[in-house]
Image: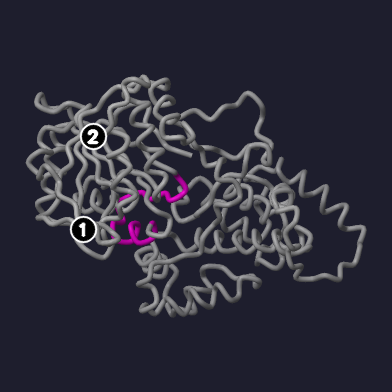
Amino acid sequence: MSQDSAAVPDAARKLAARRRREIVAVLLFSGGPIFESSIPLSVFGIDRQDAGVPRYRLLVCAGEDAPLRTTGGLELSAPYGLEAISRAGTVVVPAWRSITQAPPPAALDALRRAHEEGARIVGLCTGAFVLAAAGLLDGRPATTHWMYAPTLAKRYPSVHVDPRELFVDDGDVLTSAGTAAGIDLCLHIVRTDHGADAANALARRLVVPPRRTASDMGHQRYLDRSLPEEIGADPLAEVVAWALEHLHEQFDVETLAARAYMSRRTFDRRFRSLTGSAPLQWLITQRVLQAQRLLETSDYSVDEVAGRCGFRSPVALRGHFRRQLGASPAAYRAAYRARRPQNGPPEPALRPERVERPERERAALAAGGAERFSAAALAGHGLATAEAGEVGKPQSDAYASRLPETAVGRAAGRPVLPGQRERPVG
């Protein structure tokens, strides 16, 4: 779920003498959402020493000239300005009002100075855009709300954006995903500073889980086919639309490049600059997404789903499905159906008239046995062959999560540590 750094990166600087880690500056801007803004105020600004939570000193700072108005029209008056950031060892940017607007230069300068003097810089949700604008995320892993992740990746290509994470801890720079994930990151900061007991005590007071993982999100988190809004005005939009409409056909990135009248190399570069992801990985993600939908809403066998999603073999589908969703297609379907409301209407079947065939038994056996296949065993199976080189690459554009451990079949006694990203079993 989250990515924590076991050691402070080499780029981390020694904290300046006048800065103390327990002094937390929260940087507010006009137009910011009130919920995200309230998270660090509640976590770090209330004295809960009676519950065993060490006290922080909170400095609420205006990131620009007053008045500050939140969503809903509420007007705030921050007791401090940017000058107060010079005393903080932790600086939190809870949100930014619009991903299309540039943050104030004075605020960016204050963040850079704080970082240079060793302060811990935190961006919650769209606050990552402010950190990126200040250059603090260059060459680093980061996350943000999944809806804005493609835009962050496109606008700041040197940032390694991974929208699958609830939060990313890169030592002296930390970012979280949307809204409630900000609570997860703030609890993580308390856990890092004062230990698990303090973080658990705070979680009890806030009535939230002390530590969520990506598995806790279950099948409610989906792969997403969202792309930056700007793509609508780009000539590649036609190619993307065609690809989404013809996922059931067997085609590759060379086909898309030809439709765009570009060489493969030029197409890869243009596609990545526009979407923040490689075209091959995007295509795999869309096919897995289509397979996910068919497994939920139809009675097609896994073999049939593979054919209807453009995979040249069921083995290719199983390999990519398991890599991106952490379970085999058969296990995913079983978990999904087990979680459906008992009294709700049945899911519509795309093909109600099923013909029972002996092949179904063999397909069921194959669905279980395919999990033992290695990546090398996928060679020679159509799309899997072309994608073999992509297996070890980061999939920052794959908006995926893991199924619950019970659904995936994670081995007992293999806990997910607070610094580990979950990995598929097998």
Question: Residue 13 is drawn in which quadrant?
Answer: top left
Query: Can the viewer see residue 165?
Result: yes
Q: Residue at x 65, y 62 (%)?
A: 293
- In front of the other: 16 or 309: 16
**Image-based side of 407 in relation to 131, left or right:** right
- SS of the residue at dot 2? strand
Query: Can the viewer see residue 265?
Result: no
**Image-based side of 213 in relation to 292, left or right:** left
Q: Is residue 171 above or below residue 34?
A: above
Q: Name the residue that disc number 2 marks.
A: 120
Question: Residue 234 is drawn in which quadrant?
Answer: bottom left
Q: Which residues are magenta?
A: 149-165
Q: Name the residue that disc number 1 marks.
A: 69
**Image-based side of 366 in relation to 414, left or right:** right
Colour basis: one colour
Label 1 packing within 10 angstroms: few (<14), some (14-19), many (20+)? some
Instruction: Say which of marks 2 and 1 sits in front.
Output: 1
N-terminal label among 2 and 1: 1
Q: Residue at x 57, y 50 (%)?
A: 324
Q: Amino acid at mark 2?
A: Arg
Q: Amino acid at mark 1?
A: Arg
Q: Residue furthest left?
A: 83
- SS of the residue at dot 1? strand
Where's the C terminus, which quadrant? top right
Q: Is residue 182 above or below residue 360?
A: above
Was residue 200 drawn as part of the magenta stretch in this picture? no
Q: Is residue 120 above or below residue 290?
A: above
Q: Is residue 193 above or below residue 71?
A: above
Answer yes or no: do the residues labelled 2 and 1 have beta carbons within 8 Å? no
